[in-house]
Amino acid sequence: MVLVVVTAPDLQTLNLAPVAAVIEPMLAGASPEDWVNQEQSLQFDLQFPRDPDDPRELSEIPEVRLWFVRLDSRYPWLPFLLDWRSGELARYGAMLVPHQFHRTEGIQFNPEALEIFVMAKVFVLKDWLKARGIRLEERLVFFTQMFGYDLEQEFLERV
């Protein structure tokens, strides 16, 4: 498990250095086995102080969301590294996809925006994995299922 601490100043200044300190060494010569060993190992500790009366979730705070938009533009394949089991993938999606939060029903994504996000990530991840010689198409199926979609294996073979 790799924990990346992101402070309020990092979020407010769009500083990706805490993430780059973890990812950039991996980009420098990692083998397919190295990447597979790092799969689903990244978690974020977002340290953004809020007023106790502030009812917003972190994904509803513009500074936090904008930081994630910047992060996604730099590392669009990051979902491969996120720890899905701890909820990092769902939180990542919430930072990038318009949604509403309901106290009783939880997060409700905009359906069209979610579909675009999921398919864009499938294409990015498929190309990224292929460029590294990693065959993990079943992970792409699991990825889409995390967001409530079923992806046919035949579709992955076409892209």
Image (cartoon, rainbow, N blue to C red):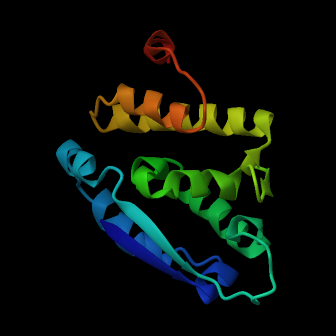
Vertically, is 21 above or below 124?
Answer: below
Which residue is found at the position 27% from the left and 33% from the top? 133
Q: Name the side, left or right, on which 132 lies relative to 47.
A: left
Observer able to see residue 115: yes
* Residue nearer the viewer, 127 or 102: 102
The part of the image, by quadrant, that contains residue 28 is bottom left
Q: Name the side, left or right, on which 147 lies relative to 85.
A: right
Observer able to see residue 82: no
* Residue nearer the viewer, 8 or 150: 150
Q: Name the side, left or right, on which 8 lies relative to 137.
A: right
Q: Position of residue 148 (x, y in %)?
A: 60, 32
* Residue nearer the viewer, 62 or 26: 62
Which residue is found at the position 39% from the left and 33% from the top? 139
The part of the image, by quadrant, that contains residue 147 is top right
Residue ranking furthest to the front:
104
Q: Position of residue 158 (x, y in %)?
A: 49, 12
Quadrant where the N terminus is found in the figure: bottom left
Which residue is found at the position 44% from the left and 14% from the top? 153
How many numbered circles are shown?
A: 0
Which residue is found at the position 36% from the left and 66% from the top? 24
Q: Name the side, left or right, on which 151 lies relative to 51.
A: left
